[in-house]
Amino acid sequence: MNLKKRFCCPVNGWDCPYFDQWKFCKLVDEGENPVLECDDAALFWEPDEDCFVWEDENGNLLDTQDLLMRGYHFVNGEPVKPPEQTFFGYEKWSQAIQALLAE
């Protein structure tokens, strides 16, 4: 499943050029961090607030809990789906995750 990261802006628009009709910030689509690039988003964002959701290829929005329930794990804030639970596949996946975390 291909997932697209979306940022639910805490500012809610206010004539923002990066805001689209679904309350998502287009800065994320451009590879930018809205909290660092937008003064308004940084002002209203709470550090413990999870403003990110993921959109699947069917347009369904999935939050962190949805992805965890579907078997995803998070590495550096990004959802990663483990391979089939064969011993060899799981071992290779575990090694890849450990390598990412070591960086």
Image (spheres, rainbow, N blue to C red):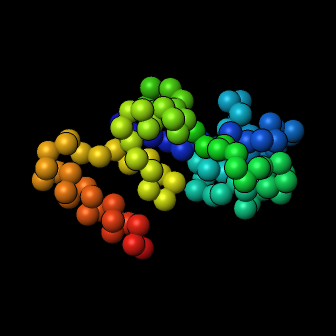
- Residue 8 x/y as whole percent: 68, 39
- Residue 92 x/y as whole percent: 20, 58
Residue 14 picture quarter: top right
Q: Residue at x 77, y 49 (%)?
A: 45
Q: Residue at x 39, y 72 (%)?
A: 102
Which sits in the foreground, 53 or 38?
53
Against 90, residue 84 (above or below) is: above
* Residue 4 seen in the figure: yes
Which sits in the foreground, 90 or 60?
90
Image quarter of the N terminus: top left
* Residue 55 seen in the figure: no
Against 96, residue 79 (above or below) is: above
Q: Residue at x 48, y 32 (%)?
A: 66
Against 37, residue 57 (above or below) is: above
- Residue 35 x/y as whole percent: 73, 56
Q: Residue at x 79, y 55 (%)?
A: 42
Against 69, residue 28 (above or below) is: below
Image quarter of the C terminus: bottom left
Q: How many marks?
A: 0
Residue 96 picture quarter: bottom left
Which sits in the foreground, 33 or 30?
33
- Residue 64 x/y as whole percent: 52, 39
Which sits in the foreground, 66 or 21?
66
